[in-house]
Image: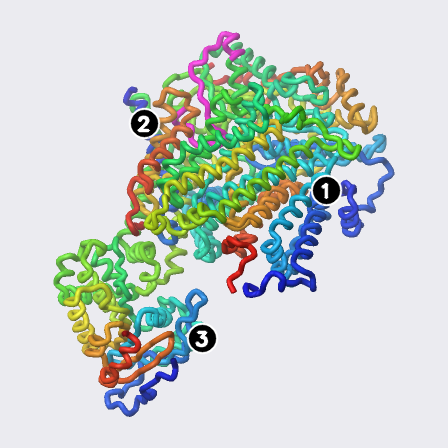
Amino acid sequence: MRTLRLIPKFKAHIWGWIDTMSSIKIENLFAAYDKADVLMDVSLEVFSGKITCLLGSNGAGKSTLIRSILGLTPPRSGRILVDNKDITNIATHKVVAEGIACIPEGRKMFPKLTVTENLRLGAFQVSNEALIRERLDKVFTSFPRLAERRDQLAGTMSGGEQAMVSIGRGLMGGPRILLIDEPSLGLSPLYVKENFKIIEGIRNSGITVFLVEQNVRQTLAIADYGYVLSGGHVVAQGTADELKENEDVYAAYFG
Amino acid sequence: MQNKTNSDVRWMGMPALAVGLIVIVAIALFGWQFLLAESELAVLGMVALAAMAGVTLGKTGLQASMSAAMRGHARSMNIAILLALVSVIFLLGQEHFPLLMLTTTLLYMTVAFGLNVQFGLTGMVNFAGASFFGVGAYTAAVLTNHGAVPPLLILVAGGVLSALIGCLLIVPVVRTAGHYSAVVTIAFSVMFKTFLEVNDVLGGPQGLMVGPMKTFGWDFNSSPVFLGLEMSFYVNYALLGAGLAALAFMFVQRLERSWIGLTLDSVRLDETASACFGLNVVRAKVLAFTFGNVLVGVAGALYGMMISFIAPNSFSFSDSLLMVAIVLLGGMGSLWGTALAAVIVVILPEKLQIIQEYRFLLFSVVVILVLLFRPEGLIPRKVRSYFPNWRPE
Amino acid sequence: MDIGLFGQYLANGVMLGTMYALVAVGFTLFFGVLDVIKFSHGDVLMLGSFTGFTVYIGLLSLGIENPWVMIAAILIVSIVTTAMLGAVIARYLVLPLKSAPPLNILLITLMLGTAIREAVRLFYPDGSNPKAFPALLPTASVDLGGFSLRADSVILVAAGVAVIIGLNLVINRTRLGLAIRAVAQDEETAKIMGINYTMIVLVTFAIGSGAAAFAGIMNGLYYNEVNFGMGLLLGLIGFCAAIIGGLGNIYGAILGGFLFAALQTIGAVALPFASAYKDVFAFGVVIALMAWKPTGLIAERSSDRV
Amino acid sequence: MAYAGNRRTIISAALAASLSLSFASAAMAKDTVKVGFIGPLTGGVSSIGLGGRNSAELAVALRNQNPDSKYEYELEVLDDECKPNVGVQVATKLAASRDVVGAVTHYCSSVAMGAVDIYHKFNLPVIVWGAVLPDITYGNDYTEVHRINGTMINQNDAAAEFMTDQGYKTWAIIHDTTDYGKGHNTYFSKYLTEDGGEIIGTFGVTSDQQDFTAELTKIKQLNPEVVYFGGLTPLAVRIRQQMDKLGIEAQFQGASGLKSEAYFKGLSGDLAEGTVTFLEGAPAEKLPGGEYFMAEYEKADFGEAFEAYGPFSFSAMNLLMDAVEEVGPDRKDVTAYLADVQDHESITGAVTFDANGQNTVALITEYVAQDGEWVVWADSEYADGTRTLTGK
């Protein structure tokens, strides 16, 4: 499997737009889940102010990687650095305190809480009430539908609306880095398109995005750089354009 | 270990069967002496010895050898165990109290096997074990006092009645799950005891005398003579108790290995999925609940006849808890674990009489520690093997 | 039945119901955040009331006799100690077993309850005998047609109801409550939101145990007697109340508590058979209720917690 | 308590020998005789059980100090938890242990009921020290079973007569649903009706009940002159307390199970004042050797009070040891000796066993709560008219 590394290892300095260091740096990560190895020697970087994507089919270990970053599945070995600070094996709420937010796979609403309460939870570590209100207003301005339903229980909303809540919730904490796990999962094509536009907008507002996806074409359309994960290994990486050109590789992985 | 065939597992160079037999003899000798031990130093010394033996021998691969023996020579081993048990009973021959303890343990074991079908296999909780035990005992009391019912039939009647009373709970128990059905059985347990106390039909709080067991002209409460020695009359009950426990063990093991057992397992693991595969979840639950209660009831009937006097106080909620403690301590669904736990739960507090009023405190602390450090129980249940000798290549 | 008598039964029932509800709320909170049943709850309550009693003895020896000062001190010390104990239990006995089968936690906390009970009986001075809890509240009473309404009962019920309402407000209106509800619904996502999960669990156990301590003090002030076995039945009833209401639902716990008190009162006075059957009646109705509504009166839907 | 074990077996003997050298070295000039004590040492009534145990221990210790005694006595103490099944187990243990010659057993009637069969089966002579159900001695013809304390028959006969003599007319009865409470209800109701009292309500309560307001509210409406409680102290405390809560102003009367120091410790204010209760025998200080017993008990510095039945346990143990002194350590001989006990001196008064082994000296003493202690009625300020019972 390792032999399939078609693209040479990434050299940051040759890229004009990389003038900053990477936001998240993962070094030689091994992670296991119920005694089965899921990630094997994964090293990658998430670049500041860009959309870095991680592509892979079901079971490639993408979600485990996200869980490792968040401290939900502690890695067996390896290091995770955020702005050169080691966050390996620290509790999830401390990871969040480093300015990392996540839009989890399947949106993960709190179904019995209202839209507003869900959004407020996104800003749980923000203690400034004025700031919370300001951000709430921003979310409601961006998603007028949510403003109409601010007191509705999140569990009673449609998938698309829940996706809005989930995105809004991810932004409420004012993160520097946003991890997005499979935003297109279970949504209608129209919403998916909409979602990717929003993610692009998030990047443009200066937030670093780490996007985990199966949907190769649409992801590469907005991403700046990408990795391909298969069987727990990083098997390919490169700029979005480079990856697009090697479609035969993806055929091998995503069939 | 998994890959080795049975003949490969050796402990100190001995074949598995030999090791198994030696262990059985050792345990029998130990049990015999432990039941006789009276001074606190002897008791504590033997408990320490057993604990040490358990830990060190487990590490030297004895355990693997043991389980290989159990797998590869199930029949010989089971016969050996039964023989060892009977020998211990005869060795204790004249010692009334140790025999009473032994029989009580065997009956609690039977109860725990029954509860195991409910807890361990089907995942149903039953916090009214002592109540069903009581139903059996009270049935025995009423039948021995009024009318000439053959005693073996009384045992059956105890089981049947316990199952019938259990039917009262079937609807709420089958409909509810988890903590909700815990409440149903807890409520029943409290209700049952209060009911017995409040009305006088069944002796009220003073309890009832239970007649002795008589079969084929053999009065169980008269002392048998063996090799010219007059034995304790408890020998009769101990033998019957051993038979009952062995029978219960066999039944439950057969059940576990049958299609019904597989059904119960799947109901426990995922009720919805089981229903999707066309399994009749309700029937499986009713079956497990009833089967468990029958075993508990039969054991209760024999217990009543042995102890010869019963009162509501003996069948309270805390007694039910003791029974649940046996199941959990042993390891859910694990029969050998259950047997070991029954020994510990019944005999330990009794042997701890020496520390008198402190022993419940100590007992509860011991259970807490075991659950903290061995959450799967003393001997966790293994993956079911349908063909003990067959291993995929 | 004449009005005075009815009033008396109602007053008694409300008093009992308030106490049961306070206990049941604890069960519901614990179940909410951690999906566990902490069966030592009743004995923790007993420990709370014994702590209060000890504080009372201590104050007496210090020469402080103002009843209001005493009540304040008893409440504060007892609630704080018991809350801390609740957190310690959660930290060292419940959280480590989180991944074990739920029955294990049930059994371990049951055993813990036994251990607490036995420890108080053995190690508290003269612990096996009942203790006279002081009557610190004013005992003036108003006679309302054959029914005497006592000031202390009114104060106790009012305080109990206030605590229940207060708890409800904390759960539904504060940031802490929001975190508790979030943890109850989805532990992992709550963590992702930056909630310190362990802390919230400990705080929830502290709150629940504190409420139990309050119920224990209330029990002591009302019956003027505490004993080492008082928690056993109260815990059992509180658990049943939480269940018939619907686990994990705070309104369910309150409803369940008052319902159980009503059942007991009806069983004792309004039914044709002897009053000794009242527990048989109450628990029998519980079983029937479970057959009718298997997940409680206020049913727990999908992930309806707290 | 019992240090040297029964060395019947090789292994335990070896273990014991290697581990207990320090204990074995005690000088033993006299033969050692083993006697037993069984009572509830854990659970709700453990305070009485512990008081009984201490008293029995005291009796043995005092006897061993006595240079005139022929034997060295060793006490084996067992806990019946006040549960019949446990009681039967420990009774079997004691009875089956061959070197135990006799025992002082049981406070809880249901336990005694279950255990008497065992004593008969194994021919172990026992003296019941606290259980009051008549059937324990009268329900069988076992020569092994004796009882030093009176039954609830004597007690309730006296209680009904005394209370009707005080001029009370109407009663409400509360009893717990244990054998003790139900038995008291039966006999008290019987004698009270015979003596002309009227029972206007009877309420059964469970033995772990906390709240009695429902029953008491009904009682308040019935408005009896006396509330009789058949049960033990913990419940009596709650009931008396809640009577006050509901404003019930009736005389409170209890059965023997009420006479415990815990009644005063459990009640606040002067609520205990004026409560009357009845107990077999006479108070320790009134007994022939009572002062001596109390002084020795004080000296031994037990953690717990001897409670209502401590003196019975003490004198039962002494009676048993007297028997052994007289006829030697043999069960059959001791049983025979006990069968003929006539006017045997003890700190609880002269003991005479009838054909059923029941002590016939049915002395019942009336007590009234006065200034935080139980005072014999005849000595109280109530008897001389300084104070009056409720409603009189």
The mark found on residue C142 in the picture is: 2
Report, in whole angstroms, how far the alpha carbon at label 2 lies from the one at label 3: 73 Å
Which amino acid does the dot numbered 1 rest on? Answer: Leu
Q: Would residue D379 appear left or right of C180 to someone viewing this image?
A: right
Chain at numbered mark 1? B
Residue occupying the point 41% across, 39% down = B286
Secondary structure, mark 3, is strand
Image quadrant in which you'd find residue D338: top right
Chain label for disc 3: A
Question: Quadrant of the image for the N terminus of chain D?
Answer: top right
Same chain check for tags 2 and 3: no
Please, is residue B53 above or below residue A67 in the view? above
For disc 2, the chain is C
Please tell me how crowded label 2 is: few (under 14), some (14-19), or many (20+) other residues with Cα within 10 Å.
few
Task: Decide if residue B215 is in sight here.
Answer: yes
Return the residue nearer the eye: D370 or C84. Answer: C84
In the picture provided, is A115 more to the left or to the right than B295?
Answer: left
**Element marked by disc 1:** helix
Q: Check disc 1 and report the residue beneath it.
A: B36
Q: B37 or D329, which lies in front? A: B37
Q: Position of residue C145 (x, y in %)?
A: 29, 21
> Is residue C267 placed above or below A174 in the rendered structure?
above
Reading the image, the residue beneath label 3 is A77
| Relative to B104, residue A85 above or below | below
Task: Quote the CA–CA distance across marks 1 and 3.
Answer: 55 Å
Label 3 Cα neighbours within 10 Å, binned few <14 / some 14-19 / many ≥20: some
Between disc 2 and disc 3, the foreground one is: 3
Say whether residue D387 is magenta.
no
Which segment did they paint magenta? D190-215
In-image side of A244 versus A22 (left or right): left
Dot 2 amino acid type:
Val
Could you say whether the residue bearing mark 2 is in a helix, strand or loop? strand
